[in-house]
Each structure stands twice: as structure tokens, then as C-alpha cells.
Amino acid sequence: MSYGILLWGNAADIDIIFVLQKKAARAIYKMGPRESLRDKFKDVKIMTVYSQYIFENLITIMAPAILVTGGAGYVGSHTVMALLERPENDHEIVVIDNLVNAFRAVGEKKPEPLKRIEEMTGRNIHFYDVDIRDQDGLNRIFENHSIQCVIHFAALKAVGESVQKPLEYYQANIAGTCTLFEKWMVISLRYFNPVGAHRSGRIGEDPSGLPNNLMPFISQVAVGRLKELMVFGNDYPTVDGTGVRDYIHVQDLAEGHVKAIRLFQQPGFSGFHAVNLGTGTGYSVLQMVKAFEKASGRNIPYKIVGRRAGDIAANYADVSLSHRLLGWRATRTLDDMCQDTWRWQSANPEGFQKS
Ligand SMILES: NC(=O)c1ccc[n+]([C@@H]2O[C@H](COP(=O)([O-])OP(=O)(O)OC[C@H]3O[C@@H](n4cnc5c(N)ncnc54)[C@H](O)[C@@H]3O)[C@@H](O)[C@H]2O)c1
């Protein structure tokens, strides 16, 4: 499918169709009655605008775009990076994020992770400070960009808070998702414990307040921001009594999303699919602590405390469907996860805010 844009002007009454292929726009027809131009280019998706419209915006409007909701957050920003790092990706990237859990410096238009990604890739990211429940805001974005695919990360994710404020979480996570996906084919990617950071060390996980997850907790202890790690229970039926989880490098995870997008382009693909993105291997809390001590060269003091309500002994993924359906598998090791987390945390001890 090509993308065309039909322009007309008040004064000269000239009609022109531009067809955009990749990033180059070329005029392929001009001076004709508008309806006959449309007839001639039936295979071209055409948008009609006034010729007074700023010309530079045409490519933005018509170039195919990927919308990443929550793209300023941890997994979202690494996925934006994975998309922009691929030389064959010619999609514009549009991010919406209401910044409830992402940092933007005072006076800046874009959140810090996106600014850093732009610096590293030399690519522009279109950013909108919009809540996914704001239907008018979403409509405007869909009018401004030719969105072909949505990768949806915008959500509230603090387990403790979700129990205290269930209605707020249903509202944000379930109603918001329904508004977004009413008319779309969906691949639901389920993942377990994303850890690590981009190998540059410039973007990574930056939880606000006390970390809810193990890895940022360990890395903040290593960097001296927190005194010691609390280990919830050492009497589970596991290798050393501590809980076992499927940790996956966030870059592997991000690449899984890029692979999933390709699936939409396959003929005959339709419906709703749920796919696990994991390594299929579990590591215990104490195995994680040891691996991180090795990567960082720092001692991680910890204290064993009682079990946490709702925790189970072991949880890891069956990843066979992701291999079959997406042709994807995680390639990075536990050492990679720890080394990359440490590179990010040691270069940004206070996260995005003070680095
Ligand atoms: N990080 C994990 O350990 C983990 C594990 C499994 C699943 N997930 C899921 O992955 C998704 C992304 O997680 P993350 O770790 O990147 O979280 P994150 O908090 O770092 O990123 C979420 C982003 O969405 C934004 N956001 C939240 N509500 C919004 C709204 N209503 N409108 C617009 N923007 C909004 C936040 O500001 C934030 O930047 C979430 O759905 C989460 O539940 C995360």
C-alpha cells in the first residue's frame, strides 16, 4: 500500500497527489479534477488537505506510524529504542504518556528517557502528554498520524497499591485498554520479571519511591541508596528456599514486541493471541543477589523476613508458543541482565532525575 496526499489551493485550484514511498514524497500527478485523481489511484490510501497546510508536516502525517502508549516508562522506552535501532524500521514513532510514572524535567517538552533515545538514535519521537482514557485526545493523535499499530504499555503496576485502590486500577488498566483496542487485532504479550537496561546505560528502570521489584531494589542497595534488601521467606520448596521467578532482559523483551508487530503483516492473521515472553528458566532471589554481587563487585546486605501475602514458590514461563508463533527467543544471560542493570544504576544513581 502506498500513501498519498491530495492537495488543493484556493487560488490556483490545482490538485496534486503526492505518493509517499518510504520517506521520499514525489508528485505523480497534477492538475486534474479531484474525483478523477482519486479514481486513478485506487490502491493509494489518500488523505485530502488544503495546500496551505505546512508542507513539512506532510511526511509526518502520512508516514506509517507506531503508537507506543506508556512509552516513557521502563519497558515502553526500551521498546521505542528497539524500534528506532532497527535500520529497516521506517515507521514514525508516536508516544503517549501521562507521566504518572515517568520523569520530565521542568520546562522540557519531552520526558527524559525519550530525549536520551533521540540523542542516541538521531531520530525524532512525537510525544503527547495524554491519558489513554482521554478519548478526544486519542482521536486527535489518530487524526494527526497514520497509526498502523499500537503497542500498549500505559498502566499502573504497583501490586500493593492495586490492592488498596482497586477501582482506580480497573479504571486505568482495563477501561483504558478497552477504549484503545475496540477495533483492533490484538496480540497480548505476557511477561514476568523484566530486568536489565539498554547496553548504553543511558536508559533503565527508574521506579518512583521504594522499588516494588527485586532487581531495582538490589541495584539501589548496591549503589548505597537503600541499606539492605528484604528477602520475603526462605522456606519455599525451591533450590535455596527463596522464591523463583522468570527474569528476562528488557532488551530481549523489547525485541519480542518488534517481532510481534511483524505477525500482523502476515496474511490470514486475525483475532486475539496471548503469548508468553520469558526465558523459561527460573532463578531464586539469592541466586539473583549472588549474580548481582559478581557483576557489580559490591556486597549486597540482605535480611530474611516473613513470606509476603500472595507470593508463590516458583513462577516461570512456558515459552514454546513464542518460539513457534513469533520466531523469537530470549538470548541474554543472567550475567548480561546484572551487568547492564549495574551500568545503568552506577551511571545514574538517582535515576533520570538527578543524573
Ligand atoms: N516491569 C515489570 O516488572 C512488569 C512485569 C510484567 C508486566 N508489566 C506490565 O508492563 C507494562 C509496562 O510496565 P513498566 O514496567 O514499563 O511500567 P512503567 O510504570 O515504567 O511504565 C508505564 C508508563 O505508562 C504511563 N501511564 C500510566 N497510566 C497511564 C495512562 N492512564 N495514560 C497514559 N500513560 C499512562 C506511566 O507514566 C509510565 O510512563 C505495564 O502494563 C505493566 O503492568 C511490567
Image (cartoon, rainbow, N blue to C red):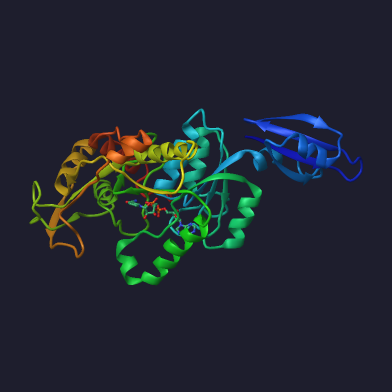
Q: Is residue 355 visible?
A: no
Q: Relative to the observer, which residue lies in front, 101 or 193?
A: 193
Residue pictured at 19% horizontal, 36% vertical: 294
The residue closer to the viewer here, 200 or 266, is 266
- Across and down, in percent, residue 100 comes to 46, 60
Residue 55: name its quadrant. top right
Q: Is residue 28 above or below residue 264?
A: above
In the depicted structure, whether residue 84 falls above or below residue 242: above
Q: How many marks?
A: 0
Splitting the image into 4 quarters, where does residue 92 fall?
Answer: top right
Which residue is found at the position 76% from the left and 43% from the top?
54
Whole-percent x, y for residue 26 in the image: 73, 29
Residue shown at 43%/52% (left/top)? Answer: 153
Q: Position of residue 245 (x, y in %)?
A: 21, 48
Quadrant containing ligand 1 reads bottom left
Image point (56%, 62%), residue name: 134
- Residue most toward the front? 268
- Asked if one can make out residue 180 in the rendered structure from this viewpoint, the answer is yes
Of all residues, the one furthest to the right in this rendering is: 11
Residue 215 location, x and y as percent?
Answer: 26, 48
In which quadrant will I find the C terminus?
top left
Query: Which of these two is toward me, 71 or 294?
Result: 71
Residue 341, quarter of picture: top left
Looking at the image, residue 66 sits to the left or right of residue 263; the answer is right
Q: Left of 229 or right of it: where is 13? A: right
Question: Which quadrant is the N terminus positioned in?
Answer: top right
